[in-house]
């Protein structure tokens, strides 16, 4: 028991990589970990809503019952916003930017997906929270604006996610490796369980919503034919794994190797996933773990964002597997 490392201690130790840091980044990562605990508390009770006698939109305490993604959104905004460490925030659930109270003391911007995979919540399947942190471009927090949120992914100073699964795991990077912590509910702490995660160069899983096959372009269709062919020399066929919660699909492939693809479709010409809340933070983590993340042509972290809720195709995971998927997308492979 002597070498238990809490996430707070680990974050504090990471500060040695930032000699100029004032400890502020440490505080705000701790804020995110705290907010994750609040969301976890609700997520693990999600199935109790019916038997605790919630009726319509009002629960037994006379409180309004919120959809869990909106609840998670409000919890994160209030838990994190009140400390004054962020000057500006952007959430998948809010149309515009959020200026938290006491923002005049904050030097950072937070972008987040409060509950990812929310359609899975009612069926007891893993969901998650994804976050991304940037330093403000200017010196005056009162002048923080949307341009502080629309920075390139490569400018992120930290990113991470929490997966609420068979156990609850928080994974983060500050650009010095990727580290994972498992929540111990008996002591209410995230404990270091996955130090320096590295992803395999290739894997045996591919993750894509193949039900959308008819909406895919020719490159994607050919890729799917390829990945299912029998060829022991290249480890094919790969196995399909698709949960429908990006965080859960990404987390599995990060640890085991594999590729996640959400390509352009006739329904979502620019892909479905969000650049600022989903693709950028996971791309930062993936690259830090030795993987690759692109939109099929361009590195995700190099994309110039133009709007908060911008969407992007996403090819992410093991380097070799992502390159093969890109080559089909670009028509390099026949
Ligand atoms: P969210 O619940 O935050 O809106 O995200 C849902 C996303 C993502 O988690 C998942 O990878 C994707 O939607 C699944 O989309 P399809 O149902 O089209 O496969
Ligand atoms: Mn999402
Ligand atoms: Mn969401």
Image (tube, rainbow, N blue to C red):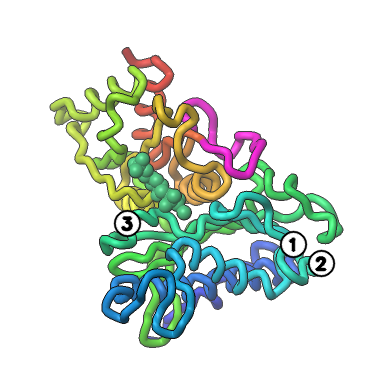
Q: CA distance from mark 3 to mark 2?
A: 38 Å
**How far from the left and from the top, in percent, is residue 137?**
78, 50
**How far from the left and from the top, in percent, is residue 284?**
53, 48
1 or 2: tag closer to the N-terminus: 1
Query: Is any atom of residue 198 visible in this view?
Result: no
Element at label 2: helix
Of residues 311 and 3, which is closer to you in this image?
A: 311
Range of magenta residues: 295-311
Q: Which residue has dot 3 on it? A: 120
Rendered image: mark on residue 87: 1
Crowd tier of the residue under label 1, counting other residues whose Cα lies within 10 Å: few below 14, some 14–19, many 20 or above: many
Crowd tier of the residue under label 2, counting other residues whose Cα lies within 10 Å: few below 14, some 14–19, many 20 or above: some
Element at label 1: strand
Q: CA distance from mark 1 to mark 2?
A: 6 Å
Label 2 near label 3: C-beta < 8 Å? no
Instruction: Specify whether tag 3 is near ligand 1 (CB below 8 Å).
Output: yes
Q: Quadrant of the N terminus?
A: bottom left
């Amino acid at each position: 028991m002597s070498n238990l490392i809490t996430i707070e201690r680990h974050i504090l130790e990471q500060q040695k990589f930032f000699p100029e840091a004032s400890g502020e980044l440490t505080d705000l990562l701790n804020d995110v970990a705290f907010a994750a605990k609040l969301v976890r508390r609700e997520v693990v009770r999600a199935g109790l809503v019916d038997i605790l006698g919630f009726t319509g939109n009002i629960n037994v305490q006379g409180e309004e019952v919120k959809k869990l993604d909106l609840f998670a959104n409000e919890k994160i905004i209030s838990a994190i916003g009140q400390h004054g460490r962020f000057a500006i925030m952007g959430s998948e659930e809010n149309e515009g930017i959020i200026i938290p109270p006491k923002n005049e003391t904050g030097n950072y911007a937070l972008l987040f997906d409060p509950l990812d995979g929310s359609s899975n919540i009612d069926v007891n399947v893993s969901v998650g929270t994804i976050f991304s942190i940037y330093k403000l471009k200017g010196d005056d927090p009162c002048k923080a604006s949307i341009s502080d949120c629309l920075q390139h992914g490569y400018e992120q100073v930290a990113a991470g996610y929490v997966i609420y699964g068979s156990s609850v795991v928080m994974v983060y990077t500050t650009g010095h490796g990727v580290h994972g912590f498992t929540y111990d509910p008996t002591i209410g702490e995230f404990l270091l369980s996955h130090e320096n995660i590295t992803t395999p160069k290739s894997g045996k899983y591919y993750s894509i919503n193949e039900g959308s096959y008819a909406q895919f372009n020719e490159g994607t269709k050919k890729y799917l034919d390829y990945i299912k062919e029998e060829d022991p020399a290249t480890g094919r066929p790969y196995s399909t794994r698709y949960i429908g919660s990006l965080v859960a699909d990404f987390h599995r492939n990060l640890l085991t190797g594999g590729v996640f693809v959400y390509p352009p479709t006739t329904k979502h010409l620019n892909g479905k996933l969000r650049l600022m809340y989903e693709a950028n933070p996971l791309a930062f983590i993936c690259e830090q773990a030795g993987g690759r993340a692109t939109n099929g042509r361009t590195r995700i972290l190099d994309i110039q964002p133009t709007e908060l809720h911008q969407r992007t195709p996403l090819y992410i995971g093991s380097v070799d597997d992502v390159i093969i998927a890109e080559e089909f997308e670009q028509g390099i492979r026949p």
